[in-house]
Amino acid sequence: MTERLTIPRPDDWHLHLRDGAMLEAVLPETARHFARAIVMPNLVPPVVTGADARAYRDRILAALPEGADFTPLMTLYLTEQTDPEDVARAAASGLVTAVKLYPAGATTNSASGVRDFDKVRPVLEKMAEIGLPLCVHGEVTDAEIDIFDREAVFIDRVLDPIRRATPGLRVVMEHITTADGVDYVKSQDRDMGGTITTHHLIINRNHILAGGIRPHYYCLPVAKRETHRLALRAAVTGGDARFFLGTDSAPHVDAAKETGCGCAGCFTATNTMSLLAHVFEEEGALDRLEGFAARHGPAFYGLPVNEATLTLEKQADPVRFPEKIESGDGPVTVFDPGFPVHWRVAQ
Ligand code: NCD
Ligand code: ZN
């Protein structure tokens, strides 16, 4: 039995760091284990221009703990007013690594997202030309579409048409939650990647709703039925380089989660690597964790694999993770997998 596993330092290809007091509280949780992260731009107001991204990156760097080895990879929030030249400049200077597409109203702070996809066509064409990836929140927002079907419908109505209309555009289907998403990514032999979160490998929709409503398991895209969770596990342990880790760790204070209309988002930054080791071991695929968490993402983004390493060790007693992280805005509950975890990140 493997008791120790050393991999290149992992990266998180989809992360919410927020701003202000929350940024201060959650950034160390990611920087402790991850070398780089794609930082989501859904602040209020969103990170729309190159200038916004530069200012946000400066705030992140200023909040980093002393001696931390962490590089934030910035993204721009695509709006119908986004200027293709501003995007091109921000990419050329190395400031931004990707552009994020939120369909308007799809999730937390997505009101400025895209309604009319024709309006963003010039930006997408510029991105295809310069090789800048588009990260996609893959859910339609139409009220008449069942929330559990929104990802599958998005593939047919939005994602596939974008792919066909913009050859050469590099696209990441983010936080895939369905077998449909896995199959779609696999059906594309170039310019396509897919991220999968830690929590979607662990919970299905019963965890949210059966035996009482669990707000800390509610996120978007919402966890689906068990067959989909199993398809995600097969995708991440199958060694396919199109799939890589994007935790979508999305902190909200408890008061915003445990209420009559709670926010979407699971906070997994603190224990993600331990949980992934548990999941991959359970699947008999510990040797595949390295590809998923540390190699496939850099390959997609054309970045080097990190030279530093991270070691996971299995211990006899369950690892004790903090139940909550304290922030200046209030406590944030750490994702609880609901089972004992014996893998810890060695110091
Ligand atoms: C994210 C958030 O809170 O910003 N929430 C979530 O459930 N994942 C937004 C998002 O990525 O959808
Ligand atoms: Zn997200």
Image (tube, rainbow, N blue to C red):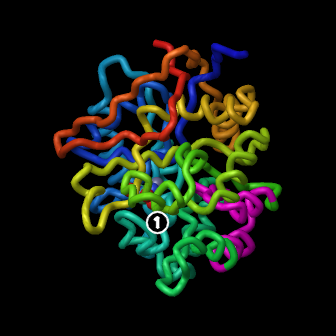
Where does the image place residue 203, in percent across and percent down from the top left?
55, 50
Count neighbours of disc 1 (C-alpha within 10 A) and say few if under 14, some if 14 to 19, many if 20 or more. Answer: many
Q: Is residue 18 visible?
A: yes
Q: Specify whether 183 is left or right of 174.
A: right
Where does the image place residue 161, in percent across and percent down from the top left?
69, 76
Q: Is residue 49 visible?
A: no
Residue 20 on the magenta segment: no
Residue 166 on the magenta segment: yes
Task: Identify the residue at horizontal 28%, vertical 35% (top origin).
Answer: 325
Query: The N terminus is located in which quarter?
Result: top right
Residue stretch rendered in magenta on the structure = 157-186
Q: Is residue 245 above or below residue 344?
A: below
Kindly identify which residue carries mark 1: 78
Where does the image place residue 220, in percent across and percent down from the top left?
47, 61
Q: Name the foreground residue: 346 vs 17.
A: 346
Answer with the quarter of the image where residue 267 lies. top left
Task: Identify the residue at horizontal 63%, vertical 14% (top origin).
Answer: 4
Q: Name the foreground residue: 84 vs 22.
A: 22
| Quadrant observed for ligand 1 in the rendered image | bottom left
Q: Is residue 317 above or below residue 79?
A: above
